[in-house]
Structures are given as structure tokens and as C-alpha cells.
Amino acid sequence: MTDYGEEQRNEVEALESIYPDSFTVLSKNPTSFTITVTSDAGENDETVQVNFKFTYVNKYPDEPPLYEILETENLEDSDVADILTLIQQQVEENLGMVMIFTLLTAVQEKLNEVVDQIKNRREEEKMKKEMEAEEAEKVQFHGTIVTIENFLSWKAKFELEMAELNRKKQKEEEALKSKLTGKQLFERDHNLDTSDIQFLEEAGNNVEVDESLFQDMDDLELEEDDPDFNPVDLGSDED
């Protein structure tokens, strides 16, 4: 017949010697105690840990002990869930034998894995930030790579902006012209100073001249040899 009490007392003594700094007896009937399991130190001396409470049932180890997690340090909820699943698996595999040390050993291995995962996550985050910084630097010094899509998008946007600028410019010019005097328009528009000349050139031979308005040159008594001769005077005498 199994002496459950004897096996339980022997295990408690062994656990107390293995975990002298974290083993605490809570009660003796039923036997209940807490143990804290801490991982090995990580790269930056970070650790993760779990504080367990175990309680023996009358027929332990033929029946599983009661257990719960009282507190954790530096663990995610997903890590805690994984640890509870791990303990359940170990309990089923070791039923019939004292198992607390076996459970805690498996948990510590799991905690060491978590520390390694923390290290890997930090390295991944570091690499990600470095890659993002490199990409930002490439954009700054080399600009955005031109593709057909972003070129057409830029072109459409540019044409809309230019059309809007031209519309505003034309509207402003029309508003300004409505307020200018003729002289100001002439000074602003240099095409006006050649408009008359252009008109005459375009008219060409189509301009009709009334010859009756002019006197026959042969009928004029011009004294070209007179040193005081001035054609202008002739016109003034007639008046």
C-alpha cells in the first residue's frame, strides 16, 4: 500500500533544498507551498519568472496536485497560456510519481526559450528599423522610383494644376483690363503700336484716294531756284 504522506514529505524536503530562496510553505494540512521559477539571464540580463502555488491532494502522486500561477514577470499572456498547457502535459505523463521538480524543470526550459524569443524579437525590430531608415535615406537622396502608374498620376495632377493657374491668370488679366485707361492698355500691349501699320499693309492697293483733292503739280508755279522757296509757304498763302 502506498504511503502518500511519506512520499509527499520527502518531496517537500527535496524541493526546499533545491529552491531555498523561493520555496515557501503555506500550510501542512493539506500540504501547500509556493515556488518561484526564474529563467537564465538573457543578453541584457533580462529574466522572466513565474510564481506557482501547489497543493497536494490525499492520493498524490497517484492523483495530480492542484496548481495555479500566482504572478508572472515579463511574460505575455500567450506565454502564460503555453506554460499552463505544458504543465498539464507533464502531469499526465508523470502521474503515479512525485512530479513537482519535473514540472518546474520543464517550466524553466520554457522560460529560457521565452528569453531567447525576446532576444530574437528585439533583433528583428532592430533590423526592421534599420531597413526603414535605409529606405527613407534612399528616398531622400534618390527620390521616388518612377513607374508608369505614378508618372501618369503626376501628369494628370500637373495638368489640372496648370489649367487652374491659367484660368486664374486669365481671369485676373480680364479684370485688370476692364479697369485700365486706353493709354495704359497701349503701354501694356505692344501689339497696339503696330496695329495701324499692319492695317495699312493689309489694305495695300485697296485704299482709294480722291485725286481731286490734290492740285496738278504742273499748274503750280514753283520757284525752285528761289533760295527762299518753301513749299509750306505756298499752302499758307492760299489760306
Image: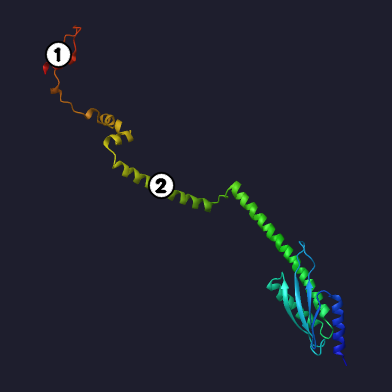
Picture quadrant of residue 45: bottom right
Disc 1 marks which amino acid? Asp
Q: Which mark is residue 218?
A: 1
Question: Which one is in front in this view, the residue at disc 2 or the one at disc 1?
Answer: 2
Tell me the kind of residue under disc 2: Leu
Q: Which residue is mark 2?
A: 165
Residue 16 drawn at (x, y percent): 85, 78
Number of numbered discs visible in the structure rendering: 2
Q: Residues within 10 Å of mark 2 (few under 14, many from 20)?
A: few
* Quarter in which the C terminus is drawn: top left
Q: Relative to 169, does residue 69 appear above or below in the rendering?
A: below
Question: Residue 177: x percent and y percent?
Answer: 30, 41
Secondary structure beneath label 2: helix
Q: Quadrant of residue 17?
A: bottom right
As drawn, the residue found furthest toward the bottom would be 1
State whether residue 155 is above or below residue 216: below
